[in-house]
Image (cartoon, rainbow, N blue to C red):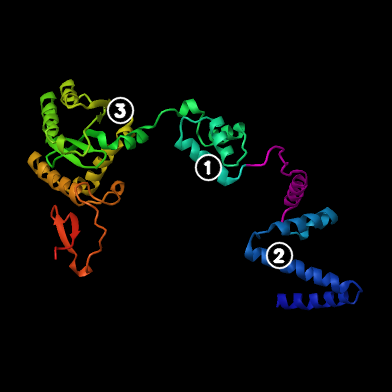
Amino acid sequence: MLFSLLYLALRVVFRFAADDTEGDKDLEILVLRHQLKVLQRKAGRPRLRRMDRVLLAAAAWVLPRDRWTSFVVAPQTLLRWHRELVRRKWTYRAKRPGRRPIDPEVQELILRMARENPRWGCVRIQGELRKLGLQVGATTIRALLRRHGLGPAPRRTGPSWSEFLRAQAHGIIACDFFTVETVFLKTLYVLFFIEIGTRKVHVTGATTNPDASWVTQQARNLAFGLDGIQAPARFLVRDRDSKFTGSFDEVFKTEGAEIILTPIRAPKANAFAERWVETVRSECLDWTLILGRRHLDRVLRTYVGHYNDQRPHRGLDLGAPNAPQHDEPTASLKDVRQLDVLGGLIHEYYAPAA
C-alpha cells in the first residue's frame, strides 16, 4: 500500500517536471543517476581503463565540485588522476646523445672472438674486425666485453679448467672417492678412475678403511692396465683428500704421469669424476639396497660393464667407450631384443646377428 501511494505521487511530480522545457533532460539525468547507483550496489567498484580516467578527469576539471557526486569515483581519486596526467605531460624519455649502438650480429662476433681467444685485447679484436670491413672503436669493444663479464685480456689469459681438460683429454685420468651406505648403516668407500678422452671407468675396489696401503695397492692394480689406454696417461687429476698419500702419487709418477691437484672447494675442476658419481647414483645405487662389500662389488662390476660397453654418451657422439658407433639401421624393428641388467633395473637393446 505504501509503495503504491509513493508510485502515484512520483507520477504526478514527474508529469509536472516534464512539462518544463528542460524537464525531460532533468528527468533523464535523474533516471541515469539512479540506474548508476543501482549498478554500483550490484557490481561493486568498477574497473576503469586509462581512457575512462582521462575522460572523467577532464570532465571534473570543468564541472563544479558540488557536481562531482555524479562520478563513480571519489573526488580525491579524480584529483589524483589529474595530477598523474600533468606529471606524465612533463615526464618523457630524454634522447641520450652518443654513438649509434652496435649491430647485434657484430656484438655476437666480438663476444665470440673474446671467448675463443682469451689472450686477445680490445685493440687486437678491433684489428680483426677491421680486416672484415667492420669499423668498431676499441672503447666500444671494451664496454661490450665488460657488460658480458669479459674483463680485459690480462684477466682472460690462460685456459680455463674445462678448456684444459678438453685439450688434453686423451692423456688425462681423473680419480675420486664416493661413499655407499649399506642396509646395516656401514659406510663403504669406493675408489674409481675415469679416462677423460674415452669416458671409460675403472672401479678398483671398495673398503670400510681406505688407508694408505689399500689406496696405494689400488693404484698399482690400475697401473697394470694403463697399457690398454689409447694415449699414455700424462696427467692424473685428483682432489686434496688426505686419503691420497704420497705413495699413491708415486705409483703414477713412475709411469710418467704428472699429478694435478684441483683447487680447494672447486668440484667443477674434477667435473668428469663428479658427473660419473652422479650418474652411478641416479641410475643404479639410489635404486639398490646394498648388503655389504661383496654385494657392492658385484653391483658396480655389472654397472661399469654396462656403462663402458653399452651406455650411450653425449660426449662420444652417443657411442659407448668400448663399442663403436653403429650407423647402419637395423633390418627390422621386430629384430630388436631387450636384455635386463641388474634384475631389470637397466635395459639394453640389441639386434641379434643374422
Work out how far the residue at label 2 is from the one at label 3, CA to CA, in angstroms: 76 Å
Classify 10 Å Cα crowding around label 3: few (below 14), some (14-19), many (20 and above).
some
Amino acid on which disc 2 is placed: Lys
Q: Nearer the viewer, residue 281 or 132?
A: 132
The x, y position of residue 97, in whole percent, is 72, 38
Residue 84 colored in magenta in the image:
yes
The residue identified by callout 1 is 109
Residue 293, quarter of picture: top left
Work out whether 354 lies above or below 151.
Answer: below
Q: Nearer the viewer, residue 21 or 234?
A: 234
**Residue placed at 61% from the left, 42% from the top?**
102
Q: Earlier in the sequence, mark 1 or mark 3?
A: 1
Which range of residues does the magenta coloring cover?
A: 72-101
Q: Nearer the viewer, residue 354 or 82?
A: 354
The x, y position of residue 232, in whole percent, is 21, 33
Q: Depth-wise, is mark 1 or mark 2 nearer the camera?
A: 1
Q: Residue furthest front?
A: 131
The residue identified by callout 3 is 262
**Residue placed at 26% from the left, 40% from the top?**
197
Which type of secondary structure does the marked residue at label 2 adopt? helix
Work out how far the residue at label 1 is from the one at label 2, CA to CA, in angstroms: 65 Å
Residue 274, quarter of picture: top left
Work out whether 241 lies above or below 3.
Answer: above
Residue 295 colored in magenta in the image:
no
The residue identified by callout 2 is 37
Residue 256, quarter of picture: top left
